[in-house]
Image: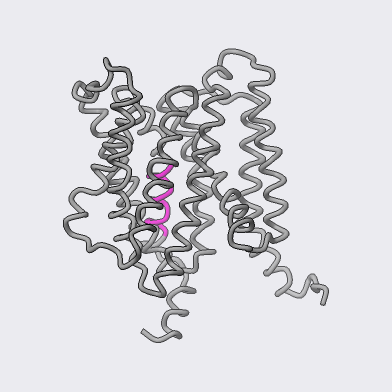
């Protein structure tokens, strides 16, 4: 395919099939947090981590070729994205975090990725990103007010420890983004995203298994053998639907359209997550949490859509940029 053809494909309007795929990913990832809470009723966090990745790698690891990158990147990504991100997130959801709020806090990975890129890769912080970081910081301060002045009831559905662990999970997600970026650079155009994700999913299984043997209460180590079919469906959803299916759809969209056009759909994930948590689990969002959600979503909108809005304004001739 020529460069012109690629450019044409990437800039094409979203078809009905494209929109369906994008909305499917938003719904799948939004429901992801409810599935985690349901599975944690019969799995410990470390057991859930191990089984999530067992489902994610089977049977694809038998069908997908290993990625043509150095194995250090595969292992590092598996540790950051698998053990780090989901280890912290599953423990947070267990010790004191709602599915609704977790779906919002995990979007903090956008800002952590930017900060890590600035500190580690020397990337530039745009004006929109600086504004977004400020709004996100205000949002986190609003969330923290639940623990400075706990009001009981709905506020007690989350804990300071759960909140801190959730933030750490978002930071580890960002770290995995940096690893993926470095891996792509080292691959020099031969990066197989699906193969990379599938084979890196083998990495977390052993650490999670060791953690459950070392850290779980002896009476809970075999708890998973008594899990209900509903919990197993939730685990299968996490591995096959939320990980493999949604990722494949998202990658397919990125290949057909510019990333800047696809990324804004991610704004719908916390919306679905909040609604799903409130409807299916009966979760309640406090006033401070709603304030935090508003600021975080505003920050995401600023980062994802701000540059496009400003570019459109400059292009229309309403504003003349300084030279």
- How would you classify the magenta stretch by its main secondary structure? helix
Q: Quadrant of residue 5?
A: bottom left
Give percent across and percent down for residue 157. 52, 20
Q: Magenta stretch: give its range.
A: 19-30
- Estimate the x, y position of residue 150 in percent, counting from the top left: 64, 16
Q: Residue at point 68% right, 69% down? A: 311
The front one of 194 and 205 is 205
Q: Is residue 26 magenta?
A: yes
Quarter in which the C terminus is drawn: bottom right
Q: Answer with left or right where residue 184 lies relative to residue 231.
A: right
Q: Is 148 located above or below residue 175 in the figure?
A: above
Query: In the depicted view, which residue is nearer to us: 69 or 270?
Result: 69
Residue 5 vertical placement versus 305 (above, below) = below
- Which color scheme is applied? one colour
Is residue 113 on the magenta stretch? no
Above or below for 5 versus 238: below
Residue 298: % across, % down: 65, 46
Image position of 157 with respect to 164: above or below: above
**Residue at the farthest right position:** 322
**Which residue is at 51% across, 32% downward?**
165
The residue at the far top in this view is 152
Task: Classify the position of the N terminus by image quarter.
Answer: bottom left
Q: Residue at x 30, y 52 (%)?
A: 245
Residue at the image point whose x is 69% and y is 61% from the top: 126
Q: How many marks?
A: 0
Q: Quadrant of residue 91?
A: top left
Query: In the rendered image, which quarter is residue 313 located in?
Result: bottom right
Q: Nearer the viewer, residue 192 or 16?
A: 192
The percent position of residue 295, horizontal first and vertical second, equals 67, 40
């Amino acid at each position: 395919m020529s460069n012109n053809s690629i450019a044409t494909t990437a800039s094409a309007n979203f078809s009905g099939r494209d929109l369906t795929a994008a909305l499917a990913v938003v719904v799948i990832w939004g429901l992801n947090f409810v599935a985690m809470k349901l599975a944690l009723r019969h799995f410990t966090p470390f057991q859930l981590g191990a089984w999530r990745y067992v489902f994610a790698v089977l049977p694809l690891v038998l069908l997908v070729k290993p990625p043509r990158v150095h194995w250090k990147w595969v292992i590092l990504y598996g540790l950051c994205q698998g053990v780090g991100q989901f280890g912290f997130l599953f423990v947070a959801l267990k010790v004191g975090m709602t599915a609704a709020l977790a779906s919002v806090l995990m979007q903090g990975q956008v800002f952590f990725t930017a900060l890590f890129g600035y500190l580690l890769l020397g990337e530039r912080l745009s004006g929109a990103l600086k504004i977004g970081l400020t709004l996100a910081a205000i949002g986190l301060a609003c969330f923290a007010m639940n623990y400075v002045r706990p009001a009981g009831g709905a506020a007690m559905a989350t804990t300071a420890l759960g909140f801190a662990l959730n933030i750490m999970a978002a930071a580890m997600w960002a770290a995995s983004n940096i690893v993926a970026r470095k891996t792509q650079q080292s691959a020099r155009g031969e990066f197989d995203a699906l193969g990379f994700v599938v084979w890196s999913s083998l990495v977390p299984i052993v650490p999670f298994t060791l953690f459950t043997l070392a850290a779980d209460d002896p009476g809970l180590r075999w708890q998973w053998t008594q899990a209900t079919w509903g919990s197993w469906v939730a685990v299968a959803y996490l591995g096959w639907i939320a990980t493999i299916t949604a990722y494949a759809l998202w990658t397919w969209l990125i290949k057909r359209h510019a990333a800047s056009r696809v990324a804004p759909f991610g704004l719908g994930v916390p919306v679905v997550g909040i609604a799903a948590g409130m409807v299916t689990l009966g979760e309640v969002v406090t006033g401070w949490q709603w304030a935090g959600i508003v600021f975080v979503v505003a920050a995401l909108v600023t980062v994802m859509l701000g540059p496009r809005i400003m570019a459109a304004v400059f292009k229309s001739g309403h504003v003349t940029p300084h030279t």
